Image (cartoon, grey):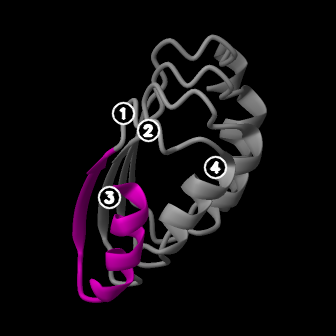
Amino acid sequence: SLHRFLLILPQCGLLQHLVLGFANVTEITDDDVVTRLVGELPGSLQYLHLDLSRCKLITLASLATVGGKFPSSLQHLQLELGSCSLTTDAGLAALADMLPGSLQHLQLDLGRCELITDPGL
């Protein structure tokens, strides 16, 4: 389960590359779960592929908070938010403002995010 994974993740202190797929995971029910997940990522992490597509409760608040919790060592982020129906232009802007300065590559999947407009990109 996701909660068991959250207990194990802090013990992976030397981890540099991580792929997490939580598409359609029913345990991601609110912003606090996403914030806690990202907050538990090891400080050594350099590459993260995080799939939260179809997690319908990802909001502006979680995107703003999550952006500031990525490890400062992160260089590559692939973030899938496709069909996250509450994701907005303001949420993307808040996420972008909080991403770590070490980030060299960012790939976003925003397919079927109906509240994202051209100016938001």
Lateral position of residue 93 relative to residue 66, left or right? right
Residue that label 4 marks: 96
Residue that label 3 marks: 48
Q: CA distance from mark 3 to mark 1?
A: 15 Å
Q: Confirm or deny contact between disc 4 and disc 2 (CB under 8 A).
A: no
Disc 2: CA contacts within 10 A as few (<14), some (14-19) or many (>=20): many
Q: Confirm or deny contact between disc 3 and disc 4 (CB under 8 A).
A: no
Name the residue type under label 2: Leu
Is 43 or 96 nearer to us in this picture? 43
Q: Residue visible at 50% across and 64% down?
A: 38
Q: Nearer the viewer, mark 3 or mark 1?
A: 1
Residue that label 1 marks: 23
Q: Secondary structure at mark 4?
A: helix
Is 96 or 84 nearer to us in this picture? 84
Disc 4: CA contacts within 10 A as few (<14), some (14-19) or many (>=20): some
Q: Position of residue 6 (x, y in %)?
A: 41, 69
Q: Secondary structure at mark 3?
A: strand
Task: Indicate which disc residue 52 carries.
Answer: 2
Q: CA distance from mark 3 to mark 4?
A: 16 Å
Q: Residue visible at 38% across and 83% down?
A: 10
Compare marks 4 and 1 and give the one earlier in the sequence. Answer: 1
Compare marks 1 and 2 and give the one earlier in the sequence. Answer: 1
Lateral position of residue 47 relative to residue 29, left or right? left
Q: Which residues are magenta?
A: 1-21
Q: CA distance from mark 4 to mark 2?
A: 17 Å
Q: Quadrant of residue 22?
A: top left
Q: Position of residue 69 (x, y in %)?
A: 59, 69
Residue 51 falls inside the magenta stretch: no
